[in-house]
Amino acid sequence: MKKLFIKVSFLLLLPFLVFGTITTHAENHSYDGKSPYYNDCASSASTKASANLVNENNKKIGVVELKFSSTCKTAWAKITMDSKVPSGFEANAEVTRNTDGKRLSCESSGGNGKVIAGQTSCYTPMVYDLDPRSSYAFGKYYGSNYNVWATTASY
């Protein structure tokens, strides 16, 4: 009986000894982190979801969009403010792939940098988004003691 217990225990532990511990990692695809203009992905883009940024007076001040390339099967976020960002304020967008939590912002390599004074928009790098994957976009406008944000639906 003792020998059987040892054999069964060993067989149960064998996969961990051979393969190590099982952990989940963010997916890595060739388009992840690339600019939407890489391989002309932006030319087949459509907006799959959007959300308005509204101020304390419930006035729309900008929009965050979840963009999708039907050619490249990728998603990215874009934030567009209704007017130029004033000094002391900034805006930024993020795209998050739901399946693994990979998150990239306009400041990530492949994006065009956060929105600063005098600018109106920025975009993030792409994440591969072919079904069953899905993603969502998040945008924020902020300054000293001021923070407005919006999140799109997932697609």
Image: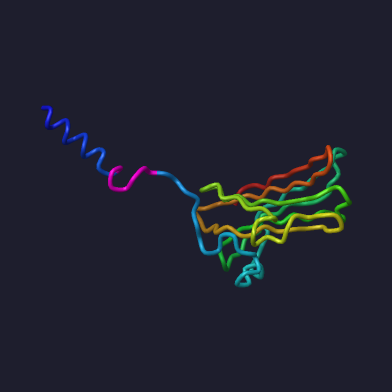
How many marks the image carries: the answer is: 0
* Residue 41 found in image quarter: bottom right
Q: Residue furthest bottom?
A: 39
On screen, residue 105 versus residue 11, left or right, reads right
Q: Quadrant of residue 81?
A: bottom right
Task: Identify which residue is drawn at 71% across, 56% down.
Answer: 78
Residue 11: image location, x then y, percent: 21, 40
Front-lying residue, 90 or 68: 90
Residue 149, horizontal then vertical, whole percent: 75, 43
Is 18 one of the magenta-colored residues?
yes
User: In the image, is 129 to the left or to the right of 144?
Assistant: left
User: Quadrant of the rendered structure where residue 80 is?
Assistant: bottom right
Rendered image coloring scheme: rainbow
Bounds of the magenta segment: 16-22
105 left or right, relative to 18 = right
Q: Is residue 68 left or right of residue 21?
A: right
Q: Looking at the figure, which quarter contains the N terminus?
A: top left
Residue 54, given in percent of the width and then of the height, sits at 81, 44
Magenta span includes 36:
no
The residue lying at 11 percent from left, 31 percent from top is 3
Residue at screen point 87% across, 58% down: 118
Residue 10 is situated, as x and y percent measured from the top left of the image, at 21, 37
Q: Is residue 14 above or below residue 115?
A: above
